[in-house]
Image (tube, rainbow, N blue to C red):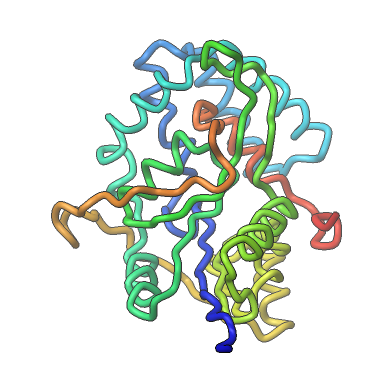
């Protein structure tokens, strides 16, 4: 009897790895125009993002931000947010995609590897973006929903740090993916568990902590510098059906500047492991 043929995959973090800035942050303006957030919220979010970049954020600040943003989005209709993201996706995201990431997508596809976006953003943002990029699989954050299809202010699954690795291992077990032969790409030390879960970790535009670890361990380091418009590069792309692994009802609604704080919680590499 022939041994089971293992699949090989390439897992890509999203923000600053595939796109040049926070994918959810980019949708703040459409949410404001839709009336879901107020000018005061936009200003507070922008201030919070600036403070984080300049001063960093501790655990207490991160938790406070998370609670406030979950409360803010409570009652929002998930379908309304999905529609808004899909309607504005090309305008908002198209100029932000790294050409180097697209080249890697094509390289992995040509080698017969499965492509995944793995993001702490919610599926309302990640799934349409994955379809636009031609990526068939998504692992993303899942939010609590009420019976009316509105956010209930809770999280069912947060695709962050060690949880990314847990979800990747579960997917590998279910699909017969050989993780030792697989690839993972990320810019952030918070994704160290995800990078450690595969045999071919790659640090892309790495932060200071991740760059140091990658250099010490002899991991490949790549610097992406060329954002490109997909329509200029490929024209009108066919949109494959994207499989959502861990994001049946995500937090794409949290497309506010302050949400970038919760997505990029700093911490020691060892602290990210359960």
Residue 118 placement (x, y as % from top left): 55, 54
Query: 219 or 169, which lies in front?
Result: 169
- The N terminus, quarter of image: bottom right
Q: Quick check: 74 above or below 133?
A: above
- The C terminus, quarter of image: bottom right
**Picture residue at 68% right of the left edge, 62% below the top:** 169
As drawn, the residue found furthest toward the bottom would be 1
Q: Quick check: 36 above or below 266?
A: above
Residue 213 placement (x, y as % from top left): 72, 74
How many labels sit on residues? 0
Residue 214 placement (x, y as % from top left): 67, 77
Residue 267 placement (x, y as % from top left): 79, 53
Q: Quick check: 153 above or below 110?
A: above
**Picture residue at 48% right of the left edge, 59% below the top:** 116
Task: Report which quarter residue 100 is drawn in.
Answer: bottom left
Relative horizontal placement of residue 83, taking residue 237 as reference (left or right): right
Relative horizontal placement of residue 62, taking residue 70 as reference (left or right): right
């Amino acid at each position: 009897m022939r041994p089971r043929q293992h699949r090989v995959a390439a897992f890509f973090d999203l923000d600053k790895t595939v796109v040049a800035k926070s994918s959810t942050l980019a949708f703040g303006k459409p949410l404001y125009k839709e009336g879901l957030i107020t000018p005061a919220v936009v200003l507070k979010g922008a201030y919070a993002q600036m403070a984080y970049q300049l001063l960093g954020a501790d655990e207490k600040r991160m938790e406070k931000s998370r609670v406030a943003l979950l409360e803010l989005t409570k009652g929002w209709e998930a379908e309304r947010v999905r529609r808004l993201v899909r309607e504005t996706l090309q305008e908002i995201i198209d100029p932000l995609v790294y050409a180097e990431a697209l080249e890697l997508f094509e390289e992995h596809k040509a080698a017969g590897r499965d492509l995944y976006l793995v993001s702490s953003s919610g599926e309302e943002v990640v799934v349409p973006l994955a379809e636009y990029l031609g990526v068939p699989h998504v692992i993303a954050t899942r939010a609590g929903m009420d019976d009316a299809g509105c956010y209930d202010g809770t999280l069912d699954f947060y695709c962050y740090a060690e949880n990314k690795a847990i979800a990747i291992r579960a997917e590998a077990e279910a699909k017969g993916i050989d993780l030792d032969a697989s690839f993972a790409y990320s810019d952030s030390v918070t994704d160290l568990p995800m990078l450690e879960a595969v045999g071919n970790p790659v640090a892309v535009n790495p932060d200071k902590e991740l760059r140091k670890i990658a250099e010490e361990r002899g991991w490949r380091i790549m610097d992406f510098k060329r954002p490109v418009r997909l329509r200029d590069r490929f024209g009108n792309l066919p949109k494959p059906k994207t499989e959502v692994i861990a994001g049946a009802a995500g937090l794409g609604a949290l497309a506010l500047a302050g949400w970038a704080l919760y997505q990029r919680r700093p911490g020691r590499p060892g602290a990210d492991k359960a």
